[in-house]
Amino acid sequence: MMKRVLTTCPYCGVGCNFYLDVRDNRIVGIIPSKSNTVSQGRLCVKGWHAHEPIQHPDRLKKPLIKENGKFSRKSGIPQNAGKEAIWKEVSWEYALDYVAGRLKEIKDKHGPDSLAVCTSARCTNEENFLMMKFARAVLGTNNVDHCARTCHSATVSGLNQSFGSGASTNSYDELTRMDCILIIGSNPTEAHPIAGWRVRTAIDNGAKIIVCDPRKILPAEDASVFIQQFPGSDIALINAMISYIITENLQDKEFIQQRTEGFNELWEAVKDCSPESVKDITGVEPTLIKKAAKLYATSKKACIMYSLGMTEHTVGTDNVIAMANLAMVCGQVGKEFSGIYPMRGQNNVQGACDIGALPNVYSGYQPVTDDAARKKFEAAWGVGLPKEKGLTLTDMMYKAIEGKLKCFYIIGEDQIRTDPNSRWIEKALDSLEFLVVQEIFMSDTAKKADVVLPGASFAEKEGTFTCAERRFQRVRKAIEPIAGKTDGEIVCEIAKRLGYAMEDNPSKVCDEMASLTPLFSGVSFDRLEANGLQWPVYAKEHPGTPVVHLEKFIRGLGKLIPVKHRPPAEVADSEYPFILTTGRMLFHYNTGTMTRRTNNLNREYPRNFVQIN
């Protein structure tokens, strides 16, 4: 008998919905949801095939312990270095007892801050909440982080400083009715195809598109203005736009006066950044910068869309602040048909940030250093909590190499393949006394582990994801977990063995999240059944918030923060004249862990490629 289960796509941060067709506990097909407000009956090519990796023969089905690695890590050199790993399948009971025992041993010997947890943007909000609770309440450390550290943590930090909230300001529905869309550091056609479809619809409706990208991406073909700036020159480019806008008296004086602070300091910083003065830095003709600035500033309905091309820089936070400055100077934020759209890379990287899978905040961005917030969580969880900020993902690697971080519990991330400088990451992981990796496939990072715990895919669990427009949406279980347990259940069973009981029912975990988080205190599974809710959701009857900062910014006044161009650490010269930059392709996703196990996608693009100018 066939059943059809509505759920949310596990790929990019757009958050499309589809139905999984299930027969005999096997997923046999996917049907788009016509009623879903996000995708409106559309899917990209990855979404159409999202079910294929779930039942791939490479799936991990049993816990594994590295026989020639057990208790063998000394002085940062594992005993089996350079040798073929020998893995032994063990029972869940044995694996969980073993992991709990090693965690306790290391905590007792070296203290709680010798341990760290990396949660996953691929897991549900509820699972991420359990993971961050496990780190803080069970292990006793704020050393918890996830992949946003290398992708969109700049968004969280930058927009929070400028607006008071590190997320998209407006809704997808508004995109199709914009007059102007400034796309910078983003390739929505390939990276976020259903958002790209909305941009295409806006163009068909008469919108003008400005594309700023070092590479001539597909949206550039439809652009009214295409700016091909040098990599790493984005702040100089945006400051030149702001300088020209103010010089030409195109700024929104009323908005600046009533809704912002810091204008004089900003003007002092950008007044000499004319389009002519930044030509050598950006490689862009001044006339193009002026044309783009005027088009954006004078459009009645204009927004900025960006992604990893702006955040994955050493100056990523400043890039985000510069875009916020541009939006506020032109009054293109805090109203409908305007705003800033950070296009999130992974399906639940927005949610993982929102629920506190970060070393400095609890759920809803409540600081761990705030006494009132900490006492609230201590009362709810019945234990004392650490007072200091934890280590970021980057700092964890440094501390591992220094010998100060002894144990790492990684869930659903492949640092060796995704983080910069893979050799350095390998050195850090090899320096640990104990490494646990929870994964659905044997990744390069999992191969370094002492214990590998088989996780569950999106189709094997209940919960929620939060997409890039701040929308909570339901994730529903279509089949039983192939390895027997969900990621949340695994974490809770380890916690129980360490003497701390955690609720593992996803609906009740969602209720616990809501009870502790004013930003989404009105969220519950029952209220998400139709099309989800966009936070803030302040109460059980609150309808959600499609547009934030309408009457005032969450921080009060929007803050105009001067940021200056800083050249990249390494620039091209006569000896090394080429600049390497990365991009996205429509048919594959990130490291290809899932899409490379999808036959039709591999047929289209069996290998990666390099484009040379």
Image (spheres, rainbow, N blue to C red):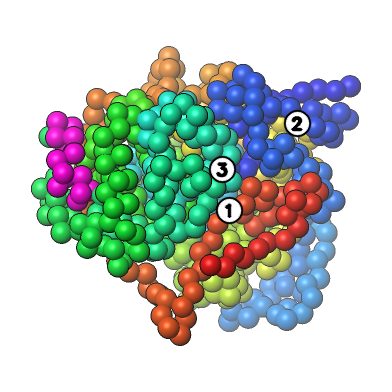
| Helix, strand or loop for disc 3 | helix
Looking at the image, is mark 2 or mark 1 nearer the viewer?
A: 1
Span highlighted in magenta in the image? 242-256
Mark sitting earlier along the chain (2/1): 2
Residue 216 appears left or right of 390: right
Task: Write down the residue under mark 3.
Answer: 189
| Helix, strand or loop for disc 2 | strand
Amino acid under disc 1: Arg
| Helix, strand or loop for disc 1 | loop
From this view, report whether residue 198 is shown above or below residue 144.
above
Mark sitting earlier along the chain (3/1): 3
Task: Write down the residue under mark 2.
Answer: 30
Q: Main secondary structure of the magenta part?
A: helix
Residue 9 in sight in this render: yes
Task: Write down the residue under mark 1.
Answer: 584
Residue 488 in sight in this render: no
